[in-house]
Image (tube, helix red, strand yellow):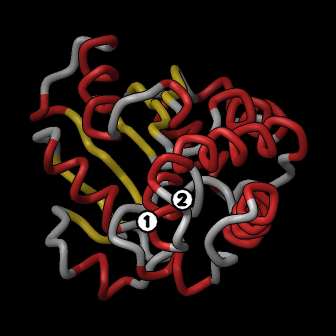
């Protein structure tokens, strides 16, 4: 089975740090308003282009906002895995292939996975900087690991993770310890809630 996991809020406790980086990116661009914690908790599509739109950054600068966040992540990313995630991943990787599908910057994610000793359990990271929607990156992961939709699960902590998993035709798992509220996620009818 192919087990796909979102990164922020699922594997690592990055809520505050990611909010800080988005505030810094907005300040650097000098457009829109500073993002707030509630923006992350309620946004329907939790990716940097959508955050840019929500906080009033002009559409022609959304890609620059995302690139600025990626650059900041690469330069100063310091977050930690949730307790016991490493053990869960070690156990799951014995019988399944694990990959990360995230909006975050690939190298920053990989660095954290190494630092937190998770890299040996994870076969691939498909970050937001690699382009395409999360559904497209889910399809890419399925292709890369010869998986079918039937034997693939997408696990996330945001409405968009569940929606993108469904769009890709895979089963979905919502986790209740991440960015968005359990009830908000349950309203998307994931196949499982943890």
Helix, strand or loop at mark 1? loop
Q: Earlier in the sequence, mark 2 or mark 1?
A: 2
| Residue beneath disc 1 | 157
Could you tell me residue 67's position as x and y percent?
65, 39
Could you tell me residue 106's position as x and y percent?
63, 30
Residue located 42% across and 84% down the image: 181
Quadrant (top left/top right/bottom left/bottom right) for the C terminus: bottom left
| Residue beneath disc 2 | 10
Depth check: give the residue in front, 6 or 91: 6
Residue located 40% across and 58% down the image: 156
Neighbour class for label 1 at 10 Å: few (<14), some, many (≥20)?
many
Q: Left of 98 or right of it: where is 19?
A: right
Are the residues flagged by discs 2 and 1 in contact, CB closer than 8 Å?
yes
CA separation in Å, label 2 and label 1:
6 Å
State the mark number for residue 191. none
Residue located 72% across and 44% down the image: 68
Please say whether residue 165 is visible from this viewpoint: yes
Q: Left of 74 or right of it: where is 12?
A: left
Up/down of 9 relative to 35, above or below = above
């Amino acid at each position: 089975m192919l087990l796909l996991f979102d990164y922020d809020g699922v594997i690592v406790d990055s809520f505050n740090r990611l909010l800080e980086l988005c505030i810094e990116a907005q300040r650097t661009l000098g457009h829109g308003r500073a993002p707030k914690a509630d923006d992350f908790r309620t946004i329907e599509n939790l990716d940097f282009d959508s955050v840019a739109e929500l906080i009033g950054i002009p559409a022609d600068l959304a890609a620059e906002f995302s690139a600025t966040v990626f650059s900041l992540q690469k330069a100063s990313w310091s977050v930690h895995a949730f307790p016991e995630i490493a053990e869960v991943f070690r156990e799951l990787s014995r019988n399944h292939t694990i990959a990360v599908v995230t909006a975050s910057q690939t190298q920053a994610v990989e660095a954290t996975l190494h630092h937190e000793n998770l890299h040996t359990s994870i076969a691939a990271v498909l970050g937001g900087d690699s382009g395409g929607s999360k559904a497209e990156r889910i399809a890419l992961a399925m292709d890369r690991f010869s998986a079918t939709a039937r034997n693939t699960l997408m696990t996330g902590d945001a409405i968009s993770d569940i929606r993108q998993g469904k769009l890709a035709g895979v089963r979905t798992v919502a986790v209740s310890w991440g960015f968005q509220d359990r009830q908000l996620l349950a309203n998307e009818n994931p196949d499982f809630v943890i």
